[in-house]
Image (cartoon, rainbow, N blue to C red):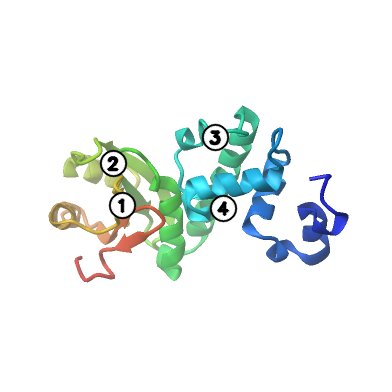
């Protein structure tokens, strides 16, 4: 970065003109700080973003997805993972302070960061209080690349233990395609019926793909 003119260095540009003035690679270069022999830090940042297919892919990337990228040693990988975790915690904190459906997009962003990019299917539940504020996100079941076994009794037990008033169901599609299947619709109705018996509402079921999250409630499937 020292080889660049002072007014083109990402740090100086950010301080002088604000973060919005930086290109994607320049912004990431600030975190990476150094490149490697024959490859400057901005070029390395470009490589990382190309490998991840942009910011959405990077933020949704599983930790193992950063291994093997030339120029990304343990320290750089740890810093990137720390930034991703800070984003997750910031969104969780916002959802704990206000009803989740004050900002449906925030819920999608949060679940995209939690579940996107995982190599196996995960079924998770957002447990909410009576005012629909986040109590906890819990991974309930984990399966193979194609399917997972979900036990309604276990979801009901956790809802009662947490004194939840409502839930948002969520799972990812490792294929990257965020389209609800017939099996997803059937599972949603099964869980909805089970939770109704203990006065817990199912507000939505979100399907997480690569950089995209689909709401079954918005599709009229709930």
Task: Say which residue label 1 marks.
Answer: 170
Compared across the picture, whether 176 is left or right of 41 comes to: left
Task: Say which residue label 2 marks.
Answer: 121
For marks 4 and 2, give the one nearer the viewer: 2
**Residue 154 image point, x, y percent:** 22, 39
Q: Residue at x 38, y 59 (%)?
A: 212
Whichever of callouts 3 and 2 sits on the residue coming sooner in the sequence is: 3
**Could you classify mark 1 by the number of other residues whose Cα lies within 10 Å: few (under 14), some (14-19), or many (20 or more)?**
many
Whichever of callouts 4 and 3 sits on the residue coming sooner in the sequence is: 3
Marks 4 and 1, Cα distance to the nearest angstrom?
Answer: 19 Å
Q: Residue at x 21, y 39 (%)?
A: 148
For marks 4 and 3, give the one nearer the viewer: 3
The secondary element bearing badge 1 is classed as: strand
Marks 2 and 1, Cα distance to the nearest angstrom?
Answer: 11 Å
Asked whether 102 or 40 is in front, the reply is 40
Task: Say which residue label 3 marks.
Answer: 69
The secondary element bearing badge 4 is classed as: helix
Whichever of callouts 2 and 1 sits on the residue coming sooner in the sequence is: 2
Asked if the residues shown at circle 4 and circle 3 are in contact, with their CB atoms under 8 angstroms apart, the answer is no
Marks 4 and 2, Cα distance to the nearest angstrom?
Answer: 24 Å
Asked if the residues shown at circle 2 and circle 1 are in contact, with their CB atoms under 8 angstroms apart, the answer is no
Q: Residue at x 69, y 54 (%)?
A: 26
Task: Say which residue label 4 marks.
Answer: 90
């Amino acid at each position: 970065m020292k080889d660049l003119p002072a007014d083109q260095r990402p740090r100086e540009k950010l301080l002088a003109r604000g973060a919005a003035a930086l290109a994607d690679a320049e912004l990431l270069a600030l975190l990476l700080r150094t490149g490697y022999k024959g490859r400057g830090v901005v070029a390395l940042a470009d490589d990382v973003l190309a490998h991840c297919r942009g910011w959405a892919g990077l933020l949704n990337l599983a930790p193992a997805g950063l291994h093997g990228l030339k120029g990304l040693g343990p320290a750089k990988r740890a810093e990137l993972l720390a930034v991703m975790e800070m984003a997750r915690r910031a969104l969780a904190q916002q959802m704990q302070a206000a009803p989740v459906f004050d900002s449906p997009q925030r819920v999608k962003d949060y679940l995209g960061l939690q579940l996107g990019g995982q190599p196996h299917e995960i079924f998770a539940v957002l447990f909410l209080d009576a005012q629909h504020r986040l109590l906890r996100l819990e991974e309930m079941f984990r399966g193979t690349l194609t399917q997972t076994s979900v036990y309604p009794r276990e979801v009901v037990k956790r809802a009662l233990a947490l004194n939840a008033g409502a839930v948002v169901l969520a799972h990812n599609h490792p294929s990257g395609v965020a389209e609800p299947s017939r099996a997803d619709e059937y599972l949603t109705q099964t869980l909805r019926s089970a939770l109704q018996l203990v006065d817990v509402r199912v507000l939505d079921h979100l399907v997480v793909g690569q950089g995209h999250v689909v709401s079954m409630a918005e599709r009229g499937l709930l």
